[in-house]
Image: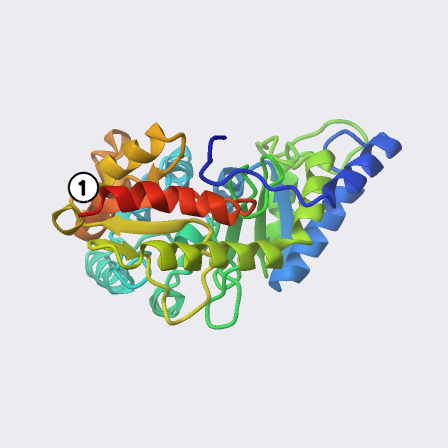
Amino acid sequence: MPRIYLSPPHMSGLEAPLVQEVFDSNWIAPLGPQVDAFEAEFATLISAPHALALSSGTAALHLALLLAGVGLSDEVLVSSLTFSASANPVTYLGARPVFIDSEPVSWNLDPALVVETIERKARHGRLPKVVIPVHLYGQSADLDPILAICARYEITVIEDAAEALGATYRGRSPGTLGWAGIFSFNGNKIITTSGGGMLVSADVAFIEHARKLATQARDPAPHYQHSEIGYNYRLSNVLAAIGRGQLQVLAERVRRKRKICETYRQLLGDLPGVSFMPEAPWGCATRWLTVITVDPAQFGATREDVRLALEAEDIESRPLWKPMHLQPVFRDCEVVGGAVAEALFRDGLCLPSGTAMGEDDLARVAGVMRKMAR
């Protein structure tokens, strides 16, 4: 039987005519009308005042941190349970990430620990420069208390919504509530441009400055002149055309992701020791990936046993993100809490969740797991 992948790209058929427009116009170089249209359509879709298409979500976060004034020896609070791209750009600027544990309701950044950490650091006269809430696996963090404490101390909030396009937080899109938000269109995301990202903000001056820096910081002159250090971070006109086609099916993809999760619940929900990532009461999750935890004492096998059994049947699954405070590269960084993230990593497994999966594929995954249960 064919291999089942975790979350492969799913083209809609709407992308090809837009890409053909690019070829017909010979506008193959970076930038162009497809990029402009993609930015405008994306901003409208999530109700963001301004959007900037970039080469990756990592590039978007780097520019946001840079223009937030993050520099040498500054501290930035970051979710510990995340991919390293949420923390790496902090180090690009010579700053230090401070890793904050998750809470069990959404598995995202714990607001109580954020408040506690900021107030403790305020007493010592060393406030963090930025807080980065990460919205994991298609679900928003609880932003209101984080935004409130950051507003009180004038700390910038940059939302990492790379995994949460299409989700909601109290009726709004995660990524649009802080000073800046970043999104990813990597090949495994709910929509993809192969590789790419988006930076959004209500601050037009910030977006325009980021646009300049992302385009090698060229000054407005007929010759090449540079007053700032710039970056080659703009999105290709070809990839933007793919993104425009993908945007048109985002709502359909969200519905399918949620249906996949519900089907897994029906197929696996009665197994002892198997629990699903909860859906927090403050919003609607996309279920970008269906994520479970496996209690070995009840289920009779560990998360890793399940992963290996699936792999033996040519089915890809993946452990949850290894917390940043457990990563060798960040071993010297401060961590607040950590037990929740560590337990989720120990027991958590991401199941195949590609929107092109059929019911037989889902049954095939479930069948392997059911054979393992006590």
Which of the 4 image quadrants contains residue 40?
A: bottom right
What residue does disc 1 label? 301
Question: What residue is drawn where x is 34% and y is 69%?
Answer: 145
Measured as percent of width and height from the top left, residue 28 is found at 78, 29
Measured as percent of width and height from the top left, residue 360 is found at 48, 45
Question: What residue is drawn where x is 53% and y is 46%?
Answer: 358
Residue at the extreme right: 24
- Seen from the viewer's position, the closer of residues 278 and 269 is 269
Q: Specify the amino acid type for callout 1.
A: Ala
Q: Is residue 97 visible?
A: no
240 relative position to 274: left or right: right
- Seen from the viewer's position, the closer of residues 14 and 83 is 14
Q: Is residue 317 above or below residue 198?
A: above
Question: What residue is drawn where x is 76% and y is 29%?
Answer: 29
- Seen from the viewer's position, the closer of residues 217 and 143 is 143
218 relative position to 129: left or right: right
270 relative position to 290: left or right: left
Which of the 4 image quadrants contains residue 372?
A: top left
- Seen from the viewer's position, the closer of residues 246 and 176 is 246
Q: Is residue 99 visible?
A: yes
Q: Residues within 10 Å of mark 1 (few under 14, many from 20)?
A: some
